[in-house]
Image (cartoon, rainbow, N blue to C red):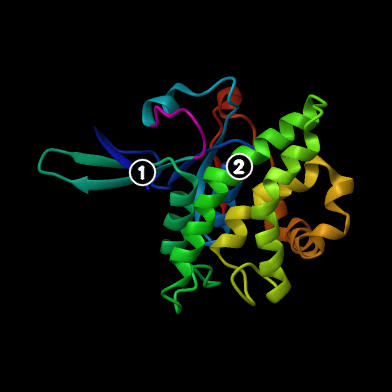
Amino acid sequence: MSLTTSEVSGKSPSTLPLLYSLQNCPYAMRARLAILLAKQTVQIRAVTMKEKPTEMLLLSPKATVPVLVIENTEATADDDVQQLTIVDESLDIMLWALNQNDPDNLLYSDDPKALPEMLKIIQENDDEFKPSLEKYKRAKRFHGDDLEECRVECEPFVQALEQRLAKHEFFMGATPSLLDYALLPFIRQFSRVNKPVFTSGNYTHLQHWLANHLQGRLFQRSMVPYPLWLDEREVCLFGE
């Protein structure tokens, strides 16, 4: 989990956290989902990767989204000091949100083994499945003759999820968890690479799981577009 801090003087016009987000980035999508699930409210600044706001780059030199900026103002003898906490990893933003409020028990707090298991699978998604998924997407986009080979490279991870759903409705049990929402944007991408293959008989449980999420109001709310920050510099609120 990567947290960095900086200090600046003065007061902020708003105490709400600030989220830099990209509409279709799967990492930004998982952050937005968690903020909604935690019933939090943030300022949202929609960006594009071709034109990144200078403000975002100064806060997070890694220059990718999502970036969450949390302001903590402390009074001093001379003035207020604004402590900024920068959270620039999507999973950390999810955990931040759900540690503020987890009304649906997505962290499975009653099971001490659940969160470590979820984090392990999420890391596997991010470190292993995502690179394979990118190869699969490129093969389809550029009509590569290795399309099927790239799909097969994704199969161990995807089939492990399929087997989990054969046992219960969600990845961790009978109710949704952090794991479901952290993986949702990536399974959505996988399903869209070659739709006829995904709708074949190999992914029956994943098809049902994905359809339920994509047709739900939560996902639709997470995908509502906002005006680009650099176009209007309009203050937009996202969440509850």
Q: Along the polypeptide, which appears first: circle 2 or circle 1?
A: 1
53 with respect to 75 (left or right): right
Region of the chain picked out in magenta, as a range: 60-66
Taking depth in this image into account, of 219 and 109 the one nearest to the observer is: 109
Magenta stretch: includes residue 72: no
User: Is residue 230 visible to the viewer in this orientation of the structure?
Assistant: yes
User: Main SS of the magenta segment?
Assistant: loop
Q: Quadrant of residue 85?
A: top left
Residue 130: image tag: 2
Q: Residue 8, percent across and down?
A: 25, 33
User: Dot 2, how many residues are within 10 Å of its Cα: few (below 14), some (14-19), or many (20+)?
Assistant: some
Q: Residue 165, percent across and down?
A: 70, 69
Give the residue drawn at x 56%, y 72%: 104
Taking depth in this image into account, of 143 and 2 the one nearest to the observer is: 143
Task: Name the residue tied to disc 1.
Answer: 2
Q: Residue 159, percent across and down?
A: 70, 58
Residue type for callout 2: Lys
Give the residue drawn at x 43%, y 46%: 17
Q: Quadrant of residue 2?
A: top left
What is the secondary structure assignment of the residue under circle 1?
loop
